[in-house]
Amino acid sequence: MTKHWDLFLAPYKQAVEELKVKLKGMRAQFEMQGVHSPIEFVTGRVKPVASILDKAQKKNIPLDKLEEQMQDIAGLRMMCQFVDDIKTVVELLRKRNDFEIVEERDYITQKKESGYRSYHVVIRYPVQTIHGEKKILVEIQIRTLAMNFWATIEHSLNYKYSGRFPEDIKLRLQRAAEAAYLLDEEMSKIRFEIQEAQAVFSRKQEAKQEE
Ligand code: 0O2
């Protein structure tokens, strides 16, 4: 059974590793040009088998239909400093020709009832294997640091309460989501001040390294 899952997940693992390199590479290119990077950091993971089985059961996905129907077995996350950076990142993804975008879900203009905000791009990514090319679905979640903070906390609480939050926690999470939204708004308003400060800081760092 473990061998079966290892074989099934191998192309997903490969895709996550490859895409981490590619998406981190985008950040490195901005840095090299000395301009603000719309990408703060990138993470990636393959969904654990237990979570795949859980989700398949919840969403009634037959196990022989996982490849077509479960879009986030391979998942990447791209974190941005500012809400406007998300648009820039999505544009950059749309321009790439090493994968095809199959779906976009905007939970920023239409946040989920839980308070969740994020932009999801589902891509079909070609993995090269010894048996030829295999195209798999990968979900890329693009969000600000504030959105990520909220989602990370809510996700861990979800484990504790199995999605059935007591009313007071639900309310607090919704208020926290509102606070994260306001934080993003305030940061956007002083974006240019922040970027100027960051540019000065990185020039100082470079000068130090050259000494
Ligand atoms: P994990 O542990 O992150 O891998 P559904 O799962 O039914 O909500 P669907 O169709 O799979 O939705 O697509 P969706 O909503 O675009 O993407 C699901 C993923 O988005 C989730 O994966 C989370 O990563 C994230 N997400 C969606 N809604 C929420 C939310 O309310 N709170 C948090 N913290 N994250 C959310 P999984 O499968 O939950 O698992």
Image: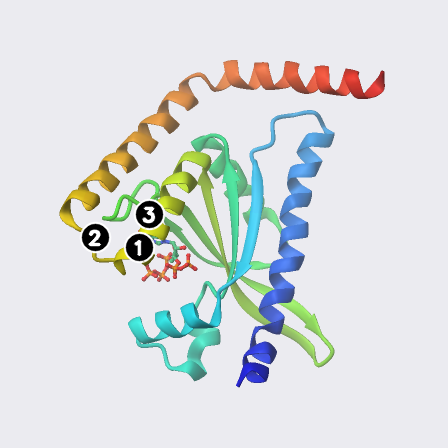
Residue 98 shows in this picture: no
Q: Quadrant of ligand 1?
A: bottom left
Does residue 134 lie above or below 138 as drawn? below
Residue type beneath disc 2:
Phe
Mark 3 vs 2, N-terminal side: 3
105 vs 80, nearest the viewer: 80
59 vs 102, nearest the viewer: 59
Q: Residue tagged by mark 1?
A: 158
Give the distance between the C-alpha atoms of the residues marked 1 and 3, in whole angstroms.
6 Å
Q: Secondary structure at mark 1?
A: helix
Q: Residue 154 has which mark?
A: 3
Point out residue 8 in the picture as x, y percentages from the top left corner.
Answer: 56, 78
Give the distance between the C-alpha atoms of the residues marked 2 and 1, in whole angstroms.
8 Å
Furthest toward the left, the residue is 167
* Crowding near the residue tagged with mark 3, few <14, some 14–19, many ≥20 C-alpha atoms within 10 Å: many
Q: Which residue shows up at 36% across the image and 41% down it?
A: 150
The verdict on label 1 being within 8 Å of ligand 1 is yes
Picture quadrant where residue 147 is located: top left
